Amino acid sequence: MSHWIIAPVILPALLAPIIAFVMRHDISLARAASFAGTIALAAITVGLVIMSADGSTHVYTLGNWPAPFGIVLVLDRLSAVMLLLTAALALIVLLHATATGWDNRGRHFHALFQFQLMGICGAFLTGDAFNLFVFFEVLLIASYGLMIHGGGRVRLQAGLQYVVMNLAGSTLFLFALGTLYASTGTLNIADLALKVRELPVEDAALIRVAAILLMVVFAIKAALFPVQFWLPATYSNAPAPVAALFAIMTKVGAYAIIRIHAAVFGPDVAVLDGLIGDWLMPAALVTLAIGAIGVLGSQRLMPLLSFSVVASMGTMMIAVAAFTPQATTAALYYLLHSTFSAAALFLLADLVVSRRPGGDALRAEPPIVQNGLFAALFFAGAIGMAGMPPLSGFLGKLLILDAMADTPHMVLSWVAILLGSLLIILGFARAGSLLFWKSTAMAPNLQATPEATPLTPDSPAPARALEVAPTMAALAALALLSVFAGPVTEYLSAASHQLFDGSDYVNAVLNLGEEG
Amino acid sequence: MEIVVASSVGVLTAGGVYLILRLRAFPVILGLALLSYAVNVFLFATGRLAINAPPVLQLYSEATYSDPLPQALVLTAIVISFGMTAVLVMVALGAYLEADHDEINMDSPNTDEDMSNKETGA
C-alpha cells in the first residue's frame, strides 16, 4: 500500500489552511506557496500515472479498515490520468491568475484554489459512493468562493444561482445514495458492482430509480440536457481563470458517469437492461444541439465560449452513452482535449476582454493592442474547440465517429456531431471576424497619429509574455495531444478496458484475489 | 411507524420543492433547508426502521440491531448541509445587497448590452 495515493488529497488540504491563516496578508507568499503546492501536485500525479501504467489497481484503505467496511481510495489508469489532467490545468490557470493579478482582486483566492484541487483529486480517487458525495461538496464549496471571487452585482447573482442549483443537486445525490443503500446495503463502488449483478430481476425497481437519480445528479455536474441551463450563466460571469478551472468541473461529472455507470450499472447488468444508455444518448444529442445553437446565437464572447463547453460535453457524452470500451476511449481522449481547449479559450478571452472598451460584446471595435497576436491565438483555440485539423479536437471527434460507427445510434450521432461542428465553426468564425478582423478596417481616431497610438494613458497595456504564456501552454497541450495521439489513445484504451473488465478493480478493492 | 416516516419525507420534500420554485432568495433557502431535512429522514430509513435496537451487532444472541451506517451518513449529511446553508445565506445576502432585490432569476444577459448599444449608437 503506497501512501503516495492519498498525497493529491492531503497536500492541498494541508496547504490551503496554511495559506488562509498564515499567508493571507502577503499575496506574494501565498502565490509562492500555491505554486509550490501545485508543482508538487503535478510531480506526484506524474508519479501516480507511471505507477498505474502497468495496469495494476492500487488500493489505499483509510485507517486500514478493510473494504467494504472502511473507505478506500483507488488508483487505476483512469483516475491517474484524470489526476494528471487536473494538475496540468491547475498549473496553467494558476499562472494566468497570478500573471494577470486576478488572484489579488478578492481575498483567499489561493486557499480556495487549493481546496478546489483537493475536492477534485479526491473525487477522482475515491472508491466509495458516499465519499464521492463528500468530495463533491468539498469541490463545490470551494467553487462557490471562487465563482464570486472579485464580486460585482451580476457575478454575485450568477453565483447565487450556481449555489442554489448545486445545493438542490447535492440533495438529489443524497436521495440517490439512500436508495442505493436501501436496495444493496453497501456504498463501496467495487462492492456495489458485485451486489448489483446479484440482485434478482424482480427487485429491479429501486435500483433502477437509484441509477437514474445518480445519472441526473452527475448530469447536473456535467451540464447535460435538461439540467445544463446553469452553465452558461455561471461560466460567463465567473472570473476568467476560474471559468478555465471549471473546465475540469464538468469533467468530474463526466468521470463519475463513466466510473459509476460503466463499472457498477454497466451494460451487462440484467436488472438495468441498458436503461442508462437509452436515456443518456438522447440527453447528449440534445445537449450538443443546444450548445451548437447557443454558440451561433450568442451576442457576447463569454456566453459563446460557455455554450461551446456545453456542446463539447454533449459530444463527449454521446460517446460515453454507447458504453463500449472503444467509445469510452474516444470519450476520454475528447475529455482531455476539451478541457485544455476550453481553458485556452477562457484564458484568451480574459486577455482580450480586459483590453476592449466594449468588454466581451461581439461587435467591431477599433483594434486593441496586439490585435494580430490575439487573433492568431483565438484562431488556434477556435480550431481546437470546433474540432478541425490539425489540433486534437479533430482527432477526438474522428475517434468518436469511428467508435459510433457500429452502434445502433450511428446515424443520429454522426448527424448531430457533424452538424454541431458546422454550427460551432460558423459561430466561432463570426465571433473571430467581428472581434479581430473587422476591427482592423475601422480607423480609430488615434491611428491618424501613429507615433502617439500606444501612449495614451488610458489605453490598455499590451500583454506581457507571462500573461500570454498560460494560453499558449494550453494550446501547446492540444498540439501535444495530437502529436502523441498514438501513445495517449493506447493508454486510454487500456484504461477503458480496465474499467469495463471490472474484475481487477473489484478483486483489488475487496481483496478477493489473495484471501478468498 | 412506516407511514409516519414516509409521509413526513413526502411532505418535507413537497414543501421544499414548492419553496424552491418561488425563485426568491429567502424562500429558496428555506426550501433547501426543508429538502435537506427530508433527505436526512430518508437516509435514516434506508437502514430499515428498527425501534429500541442498539446500533451494534450482538455477539451472544441473534437480537435485531439498527444499521449504524445510515446514522453516520446522516451525521455527515447534516454537517455538510448546515455548512452549505451558511454559505448560501452569505452569498444570497451579498447578491441582495449588490442588486437591491432578492430574485434568483437574472436579467437577460443582453439587456445591459442593448442599453449601452443605444448610448454609443446615438
Image: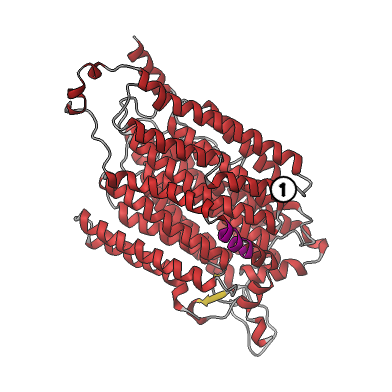
User: Residue, x 60% and y 58% (percent of image)?
Assistant: A489
Residue A45: where, in percent of width, then height?
45, 66
Prevailing SS of the magenta stretch: helix
Residue A488 colored magenta? yes
Q: Residue at x 34, y 40 (%)?
A: B94
- Which chain does the numbered disc 1 sit on? A
Query: Residue at the bottom extreme?
Result: B60
Quadrant of the frame with the C terminus of chain A? bottom right
A345 displayed left or right of A456: right
Indicate the quadrant where residue A10 lies. Answer: bottom left
| SS assignment at label 1 | helix
Question: Label 1: which residue?
Answer: A404
- Residue A452 at x, y percent in the picture: 17, 23
Residue sticking out furthest to the top: B122
In this orientation, which residue lies closer to the viewer: A107 or A447? A447
Instruction: List x then y, in percent, for residue A13.
Output: 37, 65
Amino acid type assigned to the residue bearing label 1 in the image: Met
Picture coordinates of residue A380, whole percent (x, y): 46, 39
Instruction: Give me the residue at 63% from left, 65% from top.
Output: A494
Position of A287 relative to A219 (above/below): above
Q: Is residue B65 above or below residue A305?
A: below
